Amino acid sequence: MSWFESFILGLVQGLTEFLPISSSAHLRLTAAFAGWHDPGAAFTAITQIGTETAVLIYFRKDIARIISAWFRSLTDREMRRDHDAQMGWLVIIGSIPIGVLGVTLKDQIEGPFRDLRLIATTLIVMGLVLGIADRLAARDEDGGKHRAVKERKSLQELSVRDGLIYGVCQAMALIPGVSRSGATISGGLLMGYTREAAARYSFLLAIPAVLASGLFELKDAGEGGHVSWGPTIFATIIAFGVGYAVIAWFMKYITTKSFMPFVIYRVLLGIALFVLVGTDVLSPHAGDSAQ
């Protein structure tokens, strides 16, 4: 991998990680369109350490409060009623599905799941799911001529059941094109949470999963020697800087704006990808390093 490739891929990772459009799909598609080798699941996981570091810094006060309350709740029964302590447990519980499936499906994640036809399908299907979830949220918030405004749930109302459902939604993002934030935010909206609550828990829930995945790939990459360390670290730094800016913008955007622009983008990109593969402009395995 050249330094120019790593710069572009780091930029793409930072721009797309927190938007509901799938960073892993965009890294895969960027390589395919540019005629580069697929950067692979290891590169994706390692550069995500950069974007998750941005999450750690942006939500540092929330994270510090949750960790402190969780540790105190281990010895103080009264603290177990505290929302922040409960949130610590809910993040752990919500991380179980992706941890189990990530290990179980490792070979599929690095191989068949990176087929461009599958990516096109998930872009479209999950885009439509996000559109439906967004429309339901808008209907509750705006009410209507014959419908009263319906109050949506905050994170204070997050239950173990909802945390597990969030976790299952996050696990779906093991397939490129689904989008971690897109799947978890869609799940949250469909369960009746506000846009801001769904996005905030989505970001917090991603921290253990993404950091564990990145460290796991770091270990394997160190043993196998199949990662270009200089360019990969450079891409990770780029992803961190760009990712931090995107989080700040996105958290403000969702308080007043609809997700429909992302829905339209996903569907159009998925259709375009199907056309390109169907007309043999692109191979389903274009840029695949395994080919």
Image (cartoon, rainbow, N blue to C red):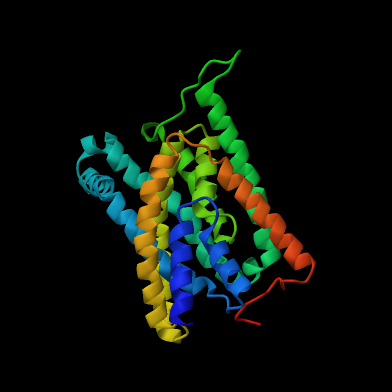
Q: Residue at x 36, y 33 (%)?
A: 156
Q: Residue at x 34, y 62 (%)?
A: 241
The picture places residue 113, in percent across and down from the top left corner, at 63, 66
Residue 48 seen in the figure: yes
Q: Is residue 156 left or right of residue 136?
A: left
Residue at the far right: name it.
279
**Is 93 drawn above or below residue 176 in the view shown?**
above
Q: Residue at x 42, y 85 (%)?
A: 223
Q: Is residue 54 left or right of residue 48?
A: left
The picture places residue 252, in percent across and down from the top left corner, at 39, 41
The picture places residue 126, in percent across and down from the top left corner, at 62, 49
The picture places residue 90, in percent across and down from the top left corner, at 38, 44
Q: Nearer the viewer, residue 107 or 116?
A: 116
Which image quarter: residue 137?
A: top right
Q: Residue at x 47, y 82 (%)?
A: 2
**Is 113 drawn above or below residue 39 in the view shown?**
above
Q: Quadrant of the C terminus?
A: bottom right
Q: Nearer the viewer, residue 27 or 8?
A: 8
Which image quarter: residue 287?
A: bottom right
